Amino acid sequence: MSGVTINNVKKAYGGFEILHGIDAEIQDGEFVVLVGPSGCGKSTLLRMIAGLEGVTSGTIAIGDRVVNEVHAKDRDIAMVFQNYALYPHMTVEQNMGFSLKLAGRKAPAIRTSVEQVAGFLGLSPLLRRYPRQLSGGQRQRVAMGRALVRNPKVFLFDEPLSNLDAKLRVQMRSEIKSLHRQFPTTAVYVTHDQVEAMTLADRIIVMCGGRIEQVGTPGELYEQPANLFVAGFIGSPAMNFLPGELADDVTSVLLGEQRVSVKAPGHAKPRQRVTVGFRPEHVRFCDSGGIHFKVADVEFTGANSYVTGHIGREQICASIGGRAHVKAGQSASIAIDPASIHLFDTTTGKALA
Amino acid sequence: MRRIFWRIALYTSVLLVTTIILAPVCWMFIMSVSSMTDLTARPMQWLPATMDFSRYRMLLTFEPNSPGEIFLLALRNTFLAAAGASILSLIVGFPAAYSFSRLPGRRAPLLYLVLSTYMLPSAALILPIYIALSAFGLLNTPFSLAVVYCSIVLPFVVWLLTGNLNTLPREIDQAAAMDGANLWQTIRHVVLPLSGAAIGTAALFGLLLAWDEFFFSLILTNDLRAKTLSVAIADFAAGRATDYPLIATAGLLSALPPVFIAFFLQRSLVKGLAAGSVKG
Ligand SMILES: Nc1ncnc2c1ncn2[C@@H]1O[C@H](COP(=O)(O)OP(=O)(O)O)[C@@H](O)[C@H]1O
Ligand SMILES: [Mg+2]
């Protein structure tokens, strides 16, 4: 087991740079999720750690060893691919045992290891089958098993659950999590799904456009997003944003015609233009004296109701536990706890903190 | 009503195509069991008075200075040249195809260059090839014919295998690399076993391309040590007293091996050609 250190790593394809200097420190045994919108370079970064892509500049180290020039096969890393990439001409048992066979282990030893991991993943009855005879979920499990058998230094996952249906995805998610608890090996997991990131990660690296936007625990990202991108990306439904202006004493902000008290940091300037962010789940309906809110639509999902509507001309969403007592077309009054309001510099997009 | 009409139209066209393909073969068979007088009689005698299979026996019996000797040695030479060309092309072509399909770099122009040699007319190549072979004392051997046939077979094999390897997901090679396989192990344990159908198809096409070849064989061979079937049959026709039934028999017999091979490899053939259209 060892950590992964990524130092000012850049990647260019034919002169076109797609990763612009990535720095990250992944601790030994940590489960880190790389999350970001499609095309932001997550897979590329993961494949560079794996050794499947060259590093244009910067260094990647596994443990204490810089591996830029080390071939993928010699990095002692296991990877689970999005399309599983099982060997179609080998049985489940052969798929899982292939790495051990290459490593020169004897057949009985390979069998023991494979059977142990297969038992663990519930694959024992399937060992004689070929990948084409398996369901999507079973193939996924075999891909995991193939990685687990090796007992590598680092696990890499590239969107391993994105080809599964929603129910299976939730189930596999919790299985991966409990697996990591039992075998705390360093893991880097790529996904574009922020819910997957929040539920799996010890720490999350949020990427956008080839850059790291923020690194932190799920709690930190949710509670203290460093910028507008992270604030909007983490959390579902997404954070509401309204344009506003700090008052002269910087203890309140003007939202449309309403004055809302906020906790702005010391360096905030009077009359500064800011973007006010607050999460749907932090909106409360109150009887009177709050912000004027015109309800446009109410969606009842069972546990929650999502109420969309407008403050002035800006659309926002509120998430209320249970049933909402407002109706479409109605006017209402809402309140937001000052402690749960986030302020961002409108020009830079950075959090005021 | 309409459906019946289409059905009839379909079967009629199938029948038509089959007839067009099979008619010459049938005629060749009839010729091969006719007597010379049947074939030269006026008016034309379409069916022979008696079936005479003596030419088959003649061609398949090895006797010095007989048509049988010529035919059987030519059969051997053709087989050596065609199989040799096919095997050599696979040995060289598979690594080339793997490299075109998998290794980074700007190899696409090179692939087109390889393909363009396929388009070169044999007549343009024959003189340099003749001079080179004669300088090495390699004229008139089935082995050198096999090497020369590679110039026809190899571009085709590279092209076919590259196309097939391109349909194999790269992640499979990469998974093997992550499992600790080096290039050779990846090819040996993963890529080769998954390319069986394509290799079979390439081998078969290589065999067929070389089996029919006439021009190179005509120029580069001059006696029984290396002469191939296509040239031997032409020789039968060039004799003073042309024996039509004998030529027909030789033609029919020389067509049998490729037909048999194609028949037995049909499954692999279809699979190899269709790879990529269906994901397995
Ligand atoms: N082999 C390549 N050649 C050129 N551009 C590439 C290549 N691979 C990926 N890219 C580009 O790099 C960017 C990041 O890709 P990727 O890492 O796959 O994104 P993600 O996994 O975050 O969706 C994309 O814009 C993609 O078009
Ligand atoms: Mg990706």
Image: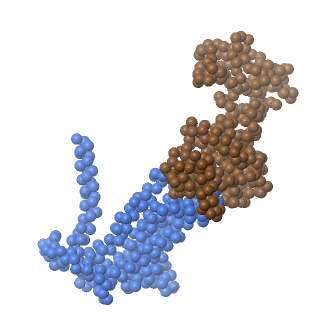
Q: Position of residue B101 (x, y in %)?
A: 56, 60
Q: Position of residue A62 (x, y in %)?
A: 75, 54
Q: At 43% across and 84% down in the image, what residue appears?
A: B140
Horizontal arrangement in the rendering, residue A99 relative to residue B166 (left or right): right
Q: Position of residue A191 (x, y in %)?
A: 65, 42
Q: At 71% across and 23% down in the image, what residue appears?
A: A282
Give the residue furthest to the right.
Answer: A266
Quadrant of residue B261 in the image?
bottom left
Asked if residue B63 can be seen in this view, the reply is yes
Q: Is residue B56 above or below residue A169?
A: below
Horizontal arrangement in the rendering, residue A92 relative to residue A181 (left or right): left
Q: Is residue B38 above or below residue A298?
A: below
A205 or B206: nearer the viewer: A205
Q: Is residue B184 above or below residue A285?
A: below
Q: At 71% across and 10% down in the image, what residue appears?
A: A288
The colour with which the image depicts chain B is blue
Q: How many marks?
A: 0
Asked if residue B171 can be seen in this view, the reply is no
Quadrant of residue B4 in the image?
top left
Who's brown, chain-wise? A
Horizontal arrangement in the rendering, residue B224 relative to residue A243 (left or right): left
Q: At 73% across and 36% down in the image, what residue appears?
A: A218
Quadrant of residue A200 in the image?
top right
B87 or B159: nearer the viewer: B87
Q: Position of residue B132 (x, y in %)?
A: 50, 81
A92 or B111: nearer the viewer: A92
